[in-house]
Image (tube, coloured by chain):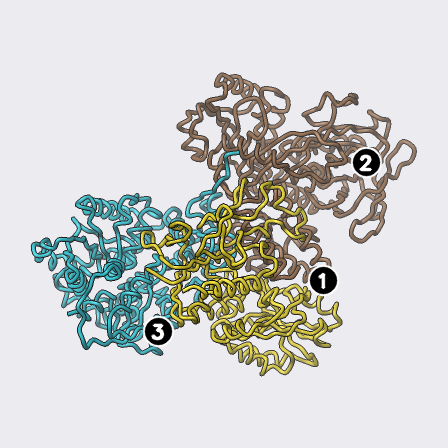
Amino acid sequence: MDPREFDVIILGGGVVGAGTMRDCAMRGLRALLIERADIATGASGRNHGLLHSGARYAVNDPESAAECIVENQILRRIAAHCIEPTDGLFISLPEDDLSYQNTFVEACRKAGIGAEIIDPQLARQLEPSVNPDLIGAVRVPDASVDPFRLCASNMLDAKLRGAQVRLRTAVTGFIREGDTIRGVHTRNVQTGREVDYYAPVVVNACGVWGQEIAQMAGVQVGMYPSKGALLIFAHRVNNMVINRCRKPSNADILVPGDTVCIIGTTSTRIPLENCHKVSVTPDEVTLLVTEGAKLSPALSETRILRAFAGVRPLVSDDNDPTGRNISRGIVCLDHETRDGLKGFVTITGGKLTTYRQMAEQATDVVCRKLGVDKACETATTPLIGSAGRSYEEVAREIWEAPSTAQKAATARLGSVVSEMPKRSRQDEELVCECEEVPVWEVNNAFERMGVSSLTDLRRRTRVGMGTCQGEFCACRAAGLLAKAQDCAERERADLLKFMGERWKGNYPIGWGESLREAEYTQWVYKHVLGL
Amino acid sequence: MKHQEKTSSKHNFEECMKCTVCTVYCPVLQVNPRYPGPKQAGPDGERLRLKDPYFFHYALKYCMNCKRCEVACPSGVGVAELIQAARIKYDHSAPKLRDRILASTDLMGTVARPLAPVVNGVTSLGLTRSVLDATLQVDHRRVFPKYSGRSFESYLKRRAKEQALYQEQVAYFHGCYVNYNYPQLGKDLVKVLNALGVGVRLLDGEKCCGIAMITNGMSAQARRNAEHNIAALRKAEADKGVKVLTTSSSCTMTLRDEYPNLLGVDNADVRDAIQMATRFVFERLEAGATLRFKPDYHKKVAYHVPCHMERLGWGVFSERLLRMIPGVEFTLLDSACCGIAGTYGFKKENYEASQAIGAPLFEQIRAVDPEVVACDCETCKWQIEMSTGYSVQNPISILADAIL
Amino acid sequence: MRFDTVIIGGGLAGLVAGISLQQAGRSTAIVSTGQNALHFFSGSFESMKEAPERLTALFAGAGIRVHYNPGVRLTPLGTFREAELSLEDISLFPEAKFADKALIACVPGYLDFFSAFLAEGLEKQGIQCRLCSLDLPEELQEGSVELRSVQLARLVDRDWKKIVQQIRLLIKDEDAVVLPQLCGLEDTSVPERLRQEIPARVVFAGTMPPSIPGIRTQRLLKRRYEVLGGTYLTGDEALDAQVEGNKIRSVRTHNLDAHALEASHFILASGGFFSKGLRSNPFRVWEPVFGVDVDFDEDRNAWYNEEFAGDQPYMKYGVKTDAALHLLVGGQPRENLYAIGSVLGATRPELGSGAGLAIRSAFLAVDEILKTV
């Protein structure tokens, strides 16, 4: 069989693309995923890390809410190693209308979300960092999710089932015969090599860039991108998600995630052409800190690590070109029925929490088109790494007395650690000290996870996500990568680029400790290392 | 935005810049490459422990609590505090019998005192030490301090009336060492203070400062002692604002800093009243008080700043005081840890590390070849005497010896 | 306690000032919050385009050997940077191609020495490179958690003979050997010994901080200062000053609390943001001990250059001074208060930057103080 021929080609390496790739592979299809940059470089890599219970949407968008809670429960089972089951609180502050709480709880119950009103005193005990002035609290099954891990796990799982991935590969055009899509023209962004791939169905899971891709295929999909700004704090302040119990507004969710916590978010419409270069404005920083402090006063006096912004791939309600009716839900477009274009499907809208459902819908359409009659099993089959054991259990199986780094790496990788080859003493050296990432975890990323730059590495291992923001680890990782892939010249440029990216997230909050760290980083990179 | 004008975190851990200077100065890391080092054990580890206590690592027990990481830190992070606080919070394993014994100095002192000559004889026997090594893992090479037949408290109680006659009064937190092992130091302090016209009294019931309990997993007991001691200090202070003097650098650091920072015992109202005797005496002499020195006094003195003294920053007072004594040929030894770290060096699993850590200091002392090594810490004294054979005296004792 | 001069900050600037003053018979104290930027020192005294006798004499007195050979030095990432005055173990070359063939020796498992980058950088200059691995010291073979320069340096100093033996066996026809800068921490003679015993030109390439030559320099300067009678207060932080008229009367510190340090002169050598000589919050930049005038931009957005590699405006911020380096409060100079080193930022461009700024400003302030009684 021609190695460039597949049953389905999926465009876009975010969670939806990865999830679709997995579902297709599980249903026996030969799948190929093509991604222009790296995994989770779109909205999948720039979000709050929140596994919604759906409570936030219960009052205004009960359909979304119901979708969320179903997926929330599913992902807790099948993606356990990507999720921290923190639960969440919806708090009412003295200035909020406490009667909204009843409306809220009622709506949750209707949507199937377990919402429990608890005494503020109990809330303070459960979550000591919560604003002590709260007058009401509702407990819901919100959770924290690592979207990079989720994306990488879906891809790894799919690869083990025979699917293939081409990263750093841009689609330059569609292979179209009349009203049928037959494949895509691609070019490798690094090498320039051009290859064509063929499949009877192509799935557009490109998020906000879906409009561009659809246009290339010859159809119109109207995107209405909305920017959201967020702040990451240097360490965890809370262990439960904290929300405001009121109509959804800006900066009213504080989510704990691994070693940090994140306050968000905002909502600003931006033109499509600006989606590549979003940054956080000083006003947004002020808003996030001020509102965040209402959820947890400690944020007023907590070091901020970085500021970042993501772009929501919002799409208009179908057939409405004015953009007035923005759909909040999942939008799955079979372009054959919609536009008369065969072999092309777009899956967009939705949210991180419902990615699996989105992948299921897209795969259902694909299977229908291919005449494959297989049911979706992604809801009941755990992802690779989530084989039903906690990371503590996995670590205990491998080491008698695991070091902190061994524990941390296991917590990130999940059960795949059991199947990894034996590690030498030198492999236990730390590359990233802030996040405790050992050499073996980095090597694994180089070898099995398609890493060819420091930003790729960061997404898969947390190298550079700690408080030093790459000061030490970036160099070490660059040295290792230079050796592993024999690319020292490329790595020097990569190192500079990586540090530039970290700086972009640093200077919007460049005061206090962050400024000290920045000055130190400048000193090390310019004067000591001579970069 | 009224926020972010300043930031604060427990023990300042968020101020860590990852500069790794603490790791450069950690004595443990120099000899034990398995120890994660202060940065990892402290501020790095804290971020992970906040997520899940599971990330606590038992290797943190290798921290000597010498505080040199904190002295070296340019960011003001309480590195050692973070490590000890993590041990207190997350290490729920019950302390071994050996650790309980080593840490319960009040108990051991009280029990040993009536039988002091017998105890001292027995503990110096090789056989005893071999048995202790085999059963409790107390290293057989470690020399035990001798116990005194009479406690310092009994000595001072007998002189309470005469001491009360002095116009100015201070209270003396003597600590376990002076009370049970070496009352002579207490007597030396009384001599010096009396010569300055200051009378000495005991606190109303003093317990062990608790430093060994804190590092040996007995923080609840330590807290009880702390509350008791602070109450006694408050009582002394309330009584005409009497200062409380100490001669042990570790007791001082514990009373002033470990109580609030590790045990959560508030001492803000009495902290400033706790002063080391050498500082008190120096400040008096600097302000014009005089002492009558022996005319033919001569001593070659090498001063070792104990780790906790370096943390307090008060080594300069002991140093200056010694230099004030006519006839003293003074050498300041390079700042280095002696390696014993209190009960740490008694434990079999740490003995070799202790001796390796102290080796540069011992070498230095031999090279200087003083008549006496001055040092404000009793466990440093045991370590240096055992490892070099040179005699070690508290600066107050040296001063008492030099005055008429 | 009373001194002639109290110096806030025990880094390069503070120590050079302290040593100079002690040598001139003045009593001084240095207050230092922890260890300092010398621990990240590259070994080259940046912006010292000359080697003043006064400086080399001061270093010689401390046992610090320097050399002055304007040219280039090799950076840890295999690039070349202009350098003039440097520590002796930092090689200075007239041109980047310092050999035809080089053997780069690395330590297995030590991640802070970038042999791949060094090889690529040297190859670019026409130097043929070959990599080899030294044996890991016994103690570390069992396992270490964090392998840093300091741990290795102690062992290299102890086992330098073994390293010589290994290199002698490994070397083929290379005319240069590139070693990581991991020696001469405790035993300052080791770099020279390696140079003498290894049959090729020995070039030490730097590693990630902590810098061994930096730590050594700090230790030697501090020891020299103390031997001259200076009082070095480590791990203490200056809190505030007591002012009388236009003069500083004393400074209080964290450890000495009520026991203020009195002096006739005060020197602020507290460094930039990293060492907390300057502090910042979202609204302003200030100097925390004396509250003196600081040159900074009121608009926070102007503090940064969006490009990481570009010059950063905030790194130029510093305290304002008059011609004689007196600090200003409300535009008025404090009679007995001086500023030296990187706390000046780029407010005195004629004095240079980095090490050059530290040294020149220290000498200037010392000369001013010595004019007075």
Q: Amino acid at mark 1?
A: Asp
Left or right? Give the position of B80 relative to A507.
Answer: left
User: Which residue appears at 23% of the width and 53% of the height?
Assistant: B208
Q: Are marks 2 and 1 in contact (CB under 8 Å)?
A: no
Query: Disc 2: which chain?
Result: A
* Quadrant the C terminus of chain C occupies: bottom left
User: Which residue appears at 22% of the width and 44% of the height?
Assistant: B234
Figure colour of chain C: yellow
Residue A12 image offset from top left, x and y in percent? 74, 40
Q: CA distance from mark 2 to mark 3?
A: 79 Å
Q: Are marks 2 and 3 on the same chain?
A: no
User: Which residue appears at 65% of the width and 81% of the height?
Assistant: C200
Query: Disc 3: which chain?
Result: B
Mark 1 surroundings: few (<14), some (14-19) or many (≥20) residues within 10 A: some
Mark 2 surroundings: few (<14), some (14-19) or many (≥20) residues within 10 A: many
Left or right? Give the position of B284 relative to C367.
Answer: left
Q: Residue furthest right?
A: A178
